Image (cartoon, rainbow, N blue to C red):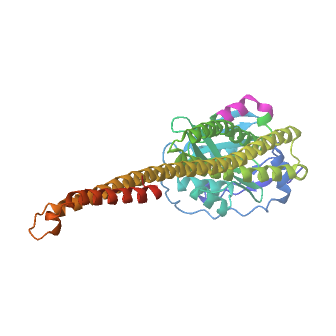
Amino acid sequence: MPERRVRPVPASKADAKGNAKPVTKGNRKSMWRRAMTSTAPPPTEPPEPSPAPAETTPPEPGSVVQAALYRDGVRVAAPASLADTFRELRDQPDGMAWIGLARPTEDEILSLAAEFDLHPLAIEDAMEAHQRPKLERYGDTLFVVLSAARYLDAPEEVDFGELHVFIGPDFLITVRHGAAPDLTAVRRRMEETPELLKLGPEAVLYAILDAVVDGYAPVVAGVQNDIDEIETEVFRGDPKVSRRIYELSREMVEFQRATRPLVGMLHGLMAGFAKYGTDEELQRYLRDVADHVTHTSERVDGFRQALADILTVNATLVTQQQNAEMRALAEAGFEQNEEIKKISSWAAILFAPTLVGTIYGMNFDDMPELGWHFGYPFAIGLMGIVCASLYVIFKRRDWL
């Protein structure tokens, strides 16, 4: 039987005489206790009691979504606050606490860190959020960051949420940043199957992983529908389609960041089956989740490639449309030039007789042709010759 682990009680929880009362946790039925208590750090001495514990700011209402205590897969208590949860867990040596938080305050996070000895780096990540999906082990505590997604039908876009999970021998803490995922269904599903819930926090982790990965399916279907609509808009020549392609491509980049690391995380968990003595039923669940997330990751990669191809096709079609418009403008300009040539040619032809007639219309006394008998036929012939010459010249140059 693995060695019992003693969790020190903070000074603020000492008895009235000033003596700390450490609580001994019994042998847990979950594989987490069987696999990890042998390597747990030695028990530490309880801190000295303080004469007057410092007052803390009360947490914001609504941060604790739900807290419950389970024994053998059955809920035995539903504390209303974190302090009640800590007290109930100490009174239940074989119990497991499942605490769900949504955008918790700093005081709530620090109280959890003090009670369950959470690593400072994991606490810092949980406070700041905006982390990439990852899996870290800190002693006998596992810290998991997941990125959930949901498809919003009205704006036709993907909304992402972040979930931090702390898993220990006798506790599981979920810290949710964002609307997704909704873990109410996960809790209800686990409570309806006590044979799985009694396997411990590791079983709850796998159920959460399954819920997050299953939440990707509606997103994949919605994105596929968007891509089909975009293809139609591209060949229809919608001018707004380029912006929609770009926005959807950005969402797929973020979706890829959510799914691709999850593949490695799940394979890392599967690699530890033998080391941590994972239950066979949980192994089947994890392999099924790994298959789903691999399929989703491949679909997302396909979406990115499809959007890149569609963007290339759209750019080609836009270029062809611009070339056609430029060709039409060039043809219109050429036809306009031809018309100008014709007008200019006829203007030049008509200008010659106008010039001759204008000169002879001056009626000066010293003009030699005024008294010439052949002056009129000569003027008419001169105008005819000039007009005919200009007509021939313009005709040869295809101006007429």
Whether 83 is drawn above or below 139: the answer is above
Which SS type dominates the magenta stretch? helix
Magenta run includes residue 191: yes
Q: Residue at x 60, y 42 (%)?
A: 180
Q: Residue at x 72, y 33 (%)?
A: 190
Whether 306 is drawn above or below 352: the answer is above
Report the side of 206 relative to 1 (left or right). Answer: left
Report the side of 290 relative to 219 (left or right). Answer: right
Any part of residue 270 in sight: yes
Q: Residue furthest front?
A: 373
Give coordinates of residue 71: x percent, y percent: 75, 37
Q: How many numbered circles does the render carry?
A: 0
Give coordinates of residue 240: x percent, y percent: 50, 45
Magenta run includes residue 257: no
Any part of residue 82 in sight: no
Q: Residue furthest left?
A: 365
Front residue of this view, candidates 184 and 55: 184
Give coordinates of residue 384: x percent, y percent: 31, 56
Please provide the residue range marked out in magenta.
185-195
Front residue of this view, candidates 113 and 101: 101
Report the side of 305 relative to 327 (left or right). Answer: right
Front residue of this view, candidates 264 and 188: 264
Front residue of this view, candidates 209 and 72: 209
Q: Residue furthest bottom?
A: 366
Give coordinates of residue 182: x percent, y percent: 61, 38
